[in-house]
Amino acid sequence: MTYDTHRGLPTLAGIVLLFLLQGCAGVRIYSASDDEVAKKAKESIVSADLKSSLKPERLAVQDFNKKEQDAVRRNQNSLRDSTLVAILSSTDNKNSWDELRRRIDDRRKALIGDNKSPEIAIQIETAIRQARDAESYLEPLRQTYLTPTKRQVILQCPINESQRPTDVMLVPLFSTFENACKTYTEAKASLERLEKQGGEFLVAKLSIEQIEVARNLIKQQLAIAKKNYTDALAVTKPPPAQAGKLEDLSETLKKRFESLGTLTQTTALSSNPILSRLLDEGKLEQFKARKDEIDQLIQALKGDTPAEATAIQKRLAAISALEKAIITEQPLMSALILEAEFLKQEVDGLQKHITRGEERIALLKKKITAMEQEIFFLNEADKALLTIAKKRSVCPVTGSLYSDFNKGDEGCRLLVAEALSAFINSMTIGRAEQELIDYQLIAQGHEAVLDDSEVALAQTENLILTPVIQISKIYASGFKAEDLSNLINALGFSAIAIRVK
């Protein structure tokens, strides 16, 4: 077969032109200059790294918080030292022995209230020790029980009746765990009652109790709302043949979706700017649900599933603010990608909100532990003073504490040292820690503001970067000369391919 290259070239050009116009209607000619501009724009935005621009401020806030904590600790240590110096340098009974006793009593009254604080303080200590001892047995007993049950049964405290064994060989092990659990729960219940007698304990306990009640209410509401939404969503996922029914179901789906974000607010949470963020759990589920649908739609539009894509579009239109854009026959992929990235940032931000709320609850509980530590040491100091009072013959309390210390025997000096060291520990380990936690709670507010700012910057960066990335992909994917050469080769026109190259 003969072929005239001079006459065949126009014919080939026609074939290629026909291929470009009809076979690949969306094909665009590659432009190196446009591609370079798009790349530089993308690189500039990425290098700007807006979402990380607050890192210096975050570090500055953390540094400030650390310095503040150090200052608080120094202040507490200074108060401790000045108190100790005042007691030891006093030359009379009133400003040494009586002053030490007064300070111990005043702190216990502040923590527990005026109602029989010495007796209640001892009862609190006893309940704490009982609870700790019983709790220390629970885990070893739980592990021991796992072996004969082939690691199938993990005992819970309080006891789950469904786990009560029918095998007589397991009854002794179960009974031992049950008794330890009973001791633990009784001690915890006693501790709860005792710490609600009054004072700072009562304030802290009621605060946490109200928060946990509100939190449980939110979780219950959220569980119901999630189930209702999931049920409504399942009904809107019929086979393609029933896709037309989606219009009738979209209104129900929309209402169920909106109910996720309308959880009942309580004063225990809404009155605090950090704890109020726990109310965002419903919003978090909303954003997750919307993002899931958008991700599914993007995936469907990338594949060959037009019927399913239409069904997802209708579901998404019912729960999305982009209803008009999404319900069209061919939603813009760039708009969907932009919305998906926006929702991702929102989800991350809401998750930080909830984490901050959880951190606050943990700090409040940590403060109660510090208060319990203070009670322990105050009780220890009180016991030493009571023992000294019973040994007046060998341990006189007639003059100043320092002079009496020098007059006493070795046993007396040891008791005085115990009283002073316990009192010092009550201030250093107990009271100072509570003060530090108070400032940590304040510092949370600074961190939370930065959380919100970082999310806003990330969304701004997303708003700019996502379209630029799409443009960059378009400019990088144009039809190039080498593509034309490969096409010619594929058609068997190797001689002309050489000329084109």
Image: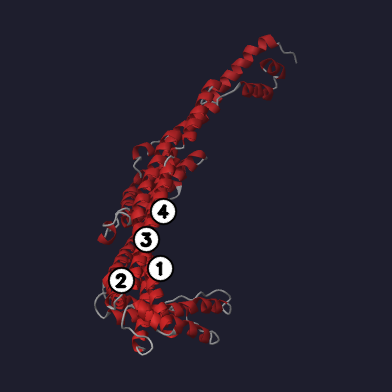
Residue pictured at 39% horizontal, 71% vertical? 424
Q: Which residue is mark 4?
A: 66
Q: Secondary structure beneath disc 1?
A: helix
- What is the number of the mark on residue 201? 2
First-in-chain label (1 vs 4): 4
Residue 22 in the image, given as x and y percentages of width and height: 54, 23
Please indicate whether residue 421 sits to the left or right of residue 24 in the image: left
Q: Is residue 330 visible?
A: no
Q: Amino acid at mark 3?
A: Leu
Horizontal and vertical percent position of residue 36: 53, 24
Residue at which label 3 appears: 436
Earlier in the chain: of badge 3 and badge 4, it is: 4
- Mark 3–mark 4 distance (CA, rounded to whole Å): 10 Å
Report how far apart the C-alphas of labels 1 and 3 lie in the structure: 11 Å
Which of discs 3 and 2 lies nearer the camera? The answer is 3
Quarter of the image where the N terminus is located = top right
Specify few, some or many for label 3: CA neighbours under 10 Å numbering under 14, 14-19, or 20 or more.
some
- Spatial separation of the CA atoms under disc 1 and disc 4: 18 Å
- Mark before the other along the chain sequence, 2 or 4: 4
Q: Residue furthest right?
A: 1
Q: In the rendered image, is residue 152 in sight?
A: yes
Residue under label 1, please give it.
429
Measured as percent of width and height from the top left, residue 344 is found at: 43, 45
Total marks drawn? 4
Of the numbered discs 1 and 3, the one sitting upstream in the chain is 1
Q: Circle 4 sits in a helix, a strand or a loop, which is it?
A: helix
Q: Residues within 10 Å of mark 2 (few under 14, many from 20)?
A: many
Do labels 1 and 2 touch, CB within 8 Å?
no
- Residue at the far top: name it: 6
